[in-house]
Structure formats: C-alpha cells, structure tokens
Image: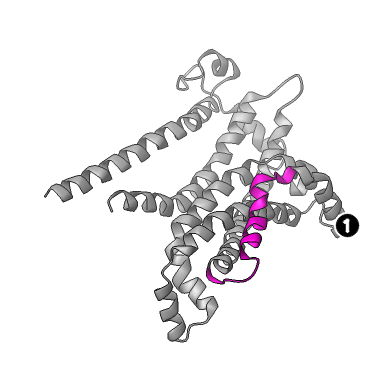
Amino acid sequence: MNMARQNWSNTFAAHAALITYTLIALFPVFVILINSFKTRKAIFREPLALPGADSFSTIGYETVLKQGDFFLYFQNSLIVTVVSLFLVLLFGAMAAFALAEYRFKGNMLMGLYLALGIMIPIRIGTVAILQLMVASGLVNTLTALILVYTAQGLPLAVFILSEFMKQVSDDLKDAGRIDGLSEYRIFFVLVLPLVRPAMATVAVFNMIPIWNDLWFPLILAPAEETKTLTLGSQVFIGQFVTDWNAVLSALSMAILPVLVLYVIFSRQLIRGITSGAVK
C-alpha cells in the first residue's frame, strides 16, 4: 500500500511539474498570439489584455499574406527542418551505435573528435562554408541549409545517443545475432526502439535552432525562392519603422508547426521522464 501510494505521489509530482513548465513556456506564445489580433496602439498600450471590440484587428495577417510569399517561406522552413532532423537522427544514431558497440583502436579519440562540434560553434566557419557551397554550386538551395544543419546537429546527437547505446543489454543484441539478424536489423529493430527517449531529446534540442535560425539562410540561401520563414519575416522589420502587427502575425503562424513537431518528439521524452519517476 505504501509503495503504491509513493508511486502515485511521484507520478502526480512529475505530471504537475510538467504542466507547470508547459504553462510557463506557453505564456510568451499566448502573448504573441493575442497581440497579433490587436491594433498597433493596443499592442503597446495593453500588451497583456485580450483583444476587445475597439482593439481587435486582422491587419497584420492581411499584410503578411499580401507582402511576400508566406506559404513558400513556410514550406521551405518545414522541408529544411524535417529533413535535417531526419538526417541528424539517422546518422547520429548510426555513429553512436558504432562507437558504443564496436571496440577498436582510436575509439575514444573518434568519439572526442565527433563531439568537438559541441564546443566549437559552426558559425566560426561561415566563410569556409560559403566558399564550399559556392564551389559546389549549392548557394541559394535548400540542400545547402540541410547539409549545414545536419553537420551542426550531429555532434550533440552522437554525444547523447552513444551514452544511451551503451546501456542497451548486450544479451539482447547477442541473442539477435544468434537468431541470424544482421547488424543493420539489430540496430533498427532491437536498439532504436529502446533509445527513443534519447532520440526525442536530440530532436527537441535541434528543432528550435533550425526553425528559428536567421544566420545561415541569410548567408547561404537569401534568394526569394529559398527564403525560410524567419528570413522572410525580416521584411517587416526596418531600421526606422517596424510593422509589429505583421511581425506578430507571422510569428503566430510560424509557431503552429513548431508546436506540432515538439509534441511529436517530446511525447517519448515525457514518457521517459515519467516512467523513470516511478521506478
């Protein structure tokens, strides 16, 4: 009875903490959303108030849809984010499995080399990256952004996933080899399902920086047909005048896919946290 009560108490505390953190994280989103439906004066006069009959306005959304190709920017950001996350998770998990499973000379040095990207920001190599993309003919293409974001996310993916790969039971993998499973099937069928919380963590950590990045889209893909949502939204921000209605409206529409992707990837992360709380 005491054990069941303790488990229930731990579960309740974990869920309460998650709900609290979620509400705190969603508050800025709520503020952006309500202000996107206000007049400019109402935004600055009462930023925390709900839109009223005298302050409600959709001028921001009308401006966003009229100026620039918002849906093209949205599509470009979605393609770059989803493909980059897929490649980061795939190649990061494969490299982490190789480092954790196979013992060879230089294993530790290889792991340290792959983790160097966590300590050295990729933006330091912007000039070299731009020269490489120009030489490869990839400037003003989504492929350039995908390659850069994949390289940016791999060090953290390898660092996190390799530690989780080491915790997978050797008996399970040896049993698969006895049954005739190839190393690829052992990796995809036996190991990956057991490290889904870790993969969700990697996805969540990499998703927001990719979606919100302005630096590399501005350097590598500034053309109209390859602009991302963040870069396209800069048209409403000027040196002397900023159209806050349009900026907040663009941000409100950009938040939705991020929330969807966050829910998809964070479900496994939350499941891992709550299951660990009752062990």
Residue at 44%, 72% in the rendered image: 190
Of 241 and 118, the residue lying toward us: 118
Residue bounds of the magenta highlight: 101-123
Task: Report the predominant secondary structure element of the magenta stretch.
Answer: helix
- Looking at the image, the residue that sits furthest to the front is 105
Q: Position of residue 40 (x, y in %)?
A: 60, 19
Of 236 and 122, the residue lying toward us: 122
Residue at 57%, 15% in the rendered image: 44
Q: Position of residue 161 (x, y in %)?
A: 52, 58
Which residue is labeled 1 in the image?
A: 135
Of 243 and 91, the residue lying toward us: 91
Q: Position of residue 75 (x, y in %)?
A: 65, 50
Is 120 displayed left or right of 31 in the figure? Answer: right
Say what secondary structure mark 1 lies in.
Answer: helix
- Residue 21 seen in the figure: yes
Residue 199 colored in magenta in the image: no
Residue at 43%, 51% in the rendered image: 269
Of 130 and 109, the residue lying toward us: 109
- Looking at the image, the residue that sits furthest to the top is 45
Residue at 66%, 45% in the rendered image: 119
Residue 122 colored in magenta in the image: yes
- Residue 222 seen in the figure: no
- Looking at the image, the residue that sits furthest to the left is 1
Say above or below: 251 vs 220: above
Amino acid under disc 1: Ala
